[in-house]
Every structure is written in C-alpha cells, then in structure tokens.
Amino acid sequence: MPEIHAARRERLRAAVAALDADAALITSLVNVRYLTGLVSSNAALLLPAGGPDVLATDSRYALAAARDCPDLELAIARFFEPVLASLAAERGLRRVAFEAHEVTVERYEVLAGLDAGLGLVSLGRAVEKLRMVKDEQEIALLARACEITSRAFEDTLPRIRPGMTERELAKLMERAIIDGGADKPAFDTIVASGPNGALPHHVPGERALTSGDMITIDGGARYAGYHADMTRTVVLGEPADWQRDVYALVAAAQQAGIRAAVPGTDLLAVDGVARDVIDQAGHREHFTHGLGHGVGLEIYEAPILGYGRTGTLADRVPITVEPGVYLPGVGGVRIEDTLVVRAGAGTAVPPELLTTTTRELLAL
C-alpha cells in the first residue's frame, strides 16, 4: 500500500508549505505509521517540502521498513533525531516544523542545541487533522474491529451470572475479542456493576455481580491498528421501573445525537442535542462527560464532541456517540456506538453504524 501512504504525505506537504517550512519532522509513532505504514516503537519521518522523504528507525525494524516502505529512503540509527537533523542541514532544510505536542522539552533542547542550526517551528496537529477523515480502506478496517467487538459482546452475554466478579467478566470479554480475531483489546475493558456504574471509567474489581444489578460493559477490539469502541448496559434479572426509565432516557439521548451527526454540523451542537434530552429530564448533573470522540489508529482521536470544541463534522469521519446518566450510590447507564459520518450526492445521509449489537435493554 505504498501509494496510499504516499498520497497522505502529499497532503501533509500543503500544511508544511503553509508554515513556510522546508520540512516536517514527524516523531509521533502513530503519525509515522499513518504516513508510512511502518509499525515501530522507535521511528521518525523527515518530510521535506519537495522530497525525498526519509524514514528513520533502528536495526530491529530495518527489514520491516525495507519491506513495508520501499518508496522511502531509510536511515537506520538508534537515536534518529540527531541523524535526521544533520541530514536536513546537509540538504539545505533550515526551517523544520516539528510536533510540539509530542516532543518533550528534553528532546526539543537536544534538537535546538545541535550544530545543524535548524530553525524549529511548531507543526501543530496537522497530521491528526488529516487523520480525522478516513479513506474507505481505513473504514473497512474499523468496521472489522467493530464487527469483532459486537460478536465478542454477544458471545459473552450468555456467560454472565450472579457471583461472577467484574474482573472476571472483563477478562471474558477480552478473551472473546482476541478469539474473534483482534490484534488485542483496544483498551482495558470497563465493567461497572451496581453502584459502580455511577463511575464512567470504573476499573473492574472484585465486586460480585448480584441479581438486580445494572452492568455497564465498555470494550472494543483493535484490528490492524484500528480501534473499536462500544458500550452496553444490561440488567442481571428483571429490570426495575427506574432502571427502565433511565435506560430509555439515555437511549433517546443517543438517538438524538446519532441523528444530528451529519456533515456540516457543529461539534458542540451534536453534543448539545443529546445533552438537552438528558437536561430536560432533570439529569443535567448526571451526564458528566462529552458525547463522543473520533476513533481510528488511536482510541481517542479528533474530533471531540463537547467541552466547547469548535469545528464541524465532515464526510467519512468515524466517531462515537456515548451519552450516559450516572447516579451516585445507585448506578448508571451508558450506551455507545461507533459510527461513520456520511454524505451522499452532496447531501447529508444518516451515519453508518459500525457497532451492530442491539441497543434494546437486555435482561439477563
């Protein structure tokens, strides 16, 4: 797939040119993977405004880099930043844009103190902005991750029983994800039962599941580097009326958010549509996080829905929509799906849902 990565690098050159920079130094490993295809724990990319591009990594990844990135010049070095800086200077690249959000102060001081005499400017999150809009190949990989996630959840449900601990249930879900073909879980699975459901990111513990509990399960698969994210809340036994009411409220809020997720809609407006449903039911203080976030090569990517974020949704942007109501000392409900914002024939169309497990309240 070198042509896909080459096309991505060409799009990045426009951002480099806009900064009046001679080159960009990409050191975020996720961004290096996005732009080159190399999966590595130690790599960087020097992207001149006019090429050729240079991929640096150490000897552990030399063969993989030669195999996966045949169109790139390779520099094999354990400590690559001084090597790339010297190479930039040799090629007359004086003004270099770097990923200021990723480079530590210590690493910056090393770069700034080199004899190469580089002028360093911030690239900003230019690569992350490119990554927001996915190509169809990326969406297919994300869809596969979501398919594995949905199937793992459905395979896990029949095994949930009273007396099982939250930790045991989390491990069951993660084993089903691996057995389903994932690289690994996209993140540590959340299982929050009973009153622990009031904690949006509760860490599964030794609490035993009890009849009458609401149980929130938040998990996902990572497949070929792409992350799925799905949450469902179920009830162990017959749901009480209050549980049905809270669940219906969150489900209505989620549907409102999903309907609003079309190209051109303000990020804050999508969050607001769902939040208004919960506010009007008297639970303003019980929905304490943003409505959702982008997903892709990272589990949390741009865009972020909520928290005063500016910007609008665009075609082919995968996001989550995950409202929740959290009642301290009682429990909580969260329903989350991964979907793709879509446009068709110049008009907005309903988003494409990638997580397909039922959103009806399940009584186990």
Image (cartoon, grey):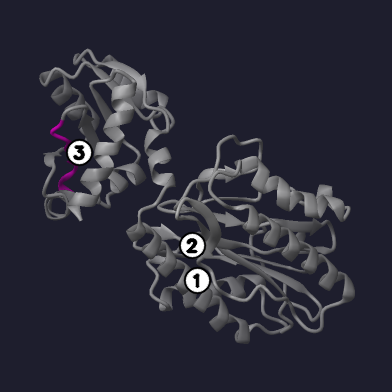
Amino acid identity at mark 1: Thr
Tell me residue 348's x, y (percent).
Answer: 54, 53
Q: CA distance from mark 1 to mark 3?
A: 37 Å
Q: Quadrant of the C terminus?
A: bottom right
- Callout 1: SS: helix
- Callout 3: SS: loop
Q: Quadrant of residue 172?
A: bottom right
From the image, tell me which residue sits under label 3: 78
Instruction: Report whether 176 appears left or right of 29.
Output: right
Q: Please tell me which residue is depicted at 76% across the width and 72% down the height of the picture.
A: 214
Tell me residue 302's x, y (percent).
Answer: 50, 43
Q: Is residue 55 magenta?
A: yes
The label number, if any, that marks residue 228 in the structure image:
2
Amino acid identity at mark 2: Ala
Q: Examine the rendering and report whether any part of residue 9 can be seen.
A: yes
User: Which of labels 3 and 2 is toward the front?
Assistant: 2
Residue 138 or residue 329, whichever sits in front: 138
Q: Specify the farthest residue to the bottom.
A: 158
Tell me residue 312's x, y (percent).
Answer: 55, 40
Amino acid identity at mark 3: Arg
The label number, if any, that marks residue 149 in the structure image:
1
**Up/down of 214 relative to 304, above or below:** below
Of the two numbered discs 3 and 2 on the same chain, state the one appearing first in sequence.
3
Instruction: Report whether 49 appears left or right of 225.
Output: left
Q: CA distance from mark 3 to mark 2?
A: 33 Å
The label number, if any, that marks residue 65 in the structure image:
none
Extent of the magenta region: 51-60
Contact (CB < 8 A) between labels 1 and 2? Answer: yes
